[in-house]
Image (cartoon, rainbow, N blue to C red):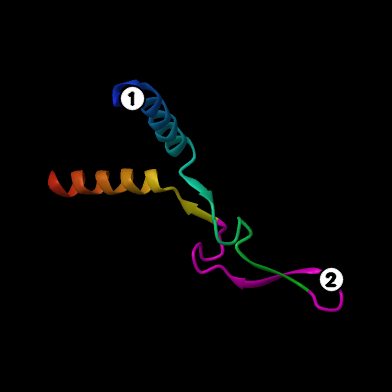
Amino acid sequence: MLSLLSYAPGLIFITLCYVALCAVSPFGTCLKCKGWGSKIRVGRYTGHVRRGRICRRCQGYGQRIRFGRRLYNLACELRRDGTR
């Protein structure tokens, strides 16, 4: 049976990679609309792709802020409010 210490370097590496990703690219594609910004509809008779309603989750931008970046922004805000 492997101890938890044997998994520590891998977890630290994955965490640092995610932190770097959040620093370089704080926004990811919206999971609900898949980056389109709205629900995609296909015309009934013509078969053409049309825009539907605007996505409620990303408000039509097609991007969302990553969870790690949201945590970073929250930590910065708490620090800023605490030092005033």
Is 66 above or below relative to 20?
Answer: below
Task: Say which mark, if any, is on residue 50.
Answer: none
| Label 1: how many Cα within 10 Å (few below 14, some 14–19, many 20+) | few
Q: Is residue 49 magenta?
A: yes
Q: Secondary structure at mark 2?
A: loop
Task: Say which mark, if any, is on residue 47.
Answer: 2
**Location of residue 79 in the rendering, given as x and y in whole percent from the top left corner:** 19, 43
Note whether residue 84 is visible.
no
Note whether residue 78 is visible.
yes
> Residue 53, located in which quarter of the rendered image?
bottom right
Q: Is residue 61 left or right of residue 47?
A: left
Three-letter residue code for mark 1: Ala
**Location of residue 36 in the rendering, given as x and y in whole percent from the top left corner:** 64, 59
Spatial separation of the CA atoms under disc 2 and disc 1 = 52 Å
Three-letter residue code for mark 2: Gly
Along the polypeptide, which appears first: circle 2 or circle 1? 1
Q: Quadrant of the N terminus?
A: top left
